[in-house]
Amino acid sequence: MKAEAIAKNHSEAIVIGMDSVGCLNGQILEKPKSREEAFQRLRSLSGNNHQFYTGIYMVNTATGKDISRVAKTEIFMRHISDKEIEKYLNEDPRYSTFALGYNPLQYVSSSFIQRIEGSYTNPLWGIPLELLVEMLSEIGFQT
């Protein structure tokens, strides 16, 4: 809806809207509201896998063509000790700014990830670059 609202004001543009969400056991992971909630989140992710989804909507205002896709990334976490979780939360107080409750790029928390299946850029930046490039080509963007 945000992309469509912006597209109405531009006659020859490609407008892109994206949003991301994390999931564990079928439950959406909201950004943690407190340090304790962040601690419990990381504890629940420890040794488990969770999903990170990014929805992309794109419209070419010159042609009226629009497309949407969803990128899914499966993230497998190694076992994380309570001490490691504490260290992370002490070193990066921005945990509440991330959909999963941790920063996949921060040097401590990046070691929590055992492996990733799917887009690597999706959980890192919230932008699945390979899908974005594919969609731009499909909608008519030319370099």
Image (tube, helix red, strand yellow):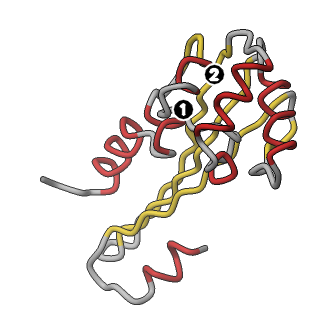
Q: Mark 1 points at which residue?
A: 104
Q: Residue at x 77, y 36 (%)?
A: 23
Total labels: the figure holds: 2
Residue 102 lies, in percent from the top left, at 64, 37
Q: Position of residue 135 (x, y in %)?
A: 38, 47
**Callout 1: 10 Å neighbours few (<14), some, many (20+)?**
some
Query: Which residue matches tag 2?
Result: 75
Where in the figure is residue 53, as x and y percent of width and height? 63, 40
At label 2, the amino acid type is Ile
Q: In this view, does 104 lie to the left or right of 33?
A: left
Residue in the picture at 52% in, 53% down:
56
Looking at this view, is 37 or 90 the one in front? 90
Q: Tell which of 76 and 88 is nearer to you.
A: 88
Gap in Å between the C-alphas at discs 1 and 2? 10 Å
For badge 1, the amino acid type reads Pro
**Residue 113 numbered mark, or none:** none
Residue sticking out furthest to the bottom: 9
Closer to the N terminus: mark 1 or mark 2?
2
Other-residue count near label 2 (Cα within 10 Å), few / some / many at <14 / 14–19 / ≥20: many
Which image quarter is the N terminus in?
bottom right
Q: Are marks 1 and 2 in contact (CB under 8 Å)?
A: yes
Mark toward the viewer: 1 or 2: 1
Instruction: Tell me if 89 is positioned left or right of 6 in this view.
Output: right
Q: For residue 51, which quarter of the picture? A: top right
Residue depicted at 82% across the width and 51% down the height: 34
Q: Is residue 78 above or below residue 63?
A: above
Q: What element carries label 2?
A: strand
**Nearer to the camera, 53 or 38:** 38
Q: Is residue 131 above or below residue 117?
A: below
x and y percentages locating residue 100 in the rendered image: 69, 40
Would residue 106 appear left or right of 83 to someone viewing this image?
left
User: Which residue lies at the image location 73% right of the left edge and 15% below the top edge?
Assistant: 80
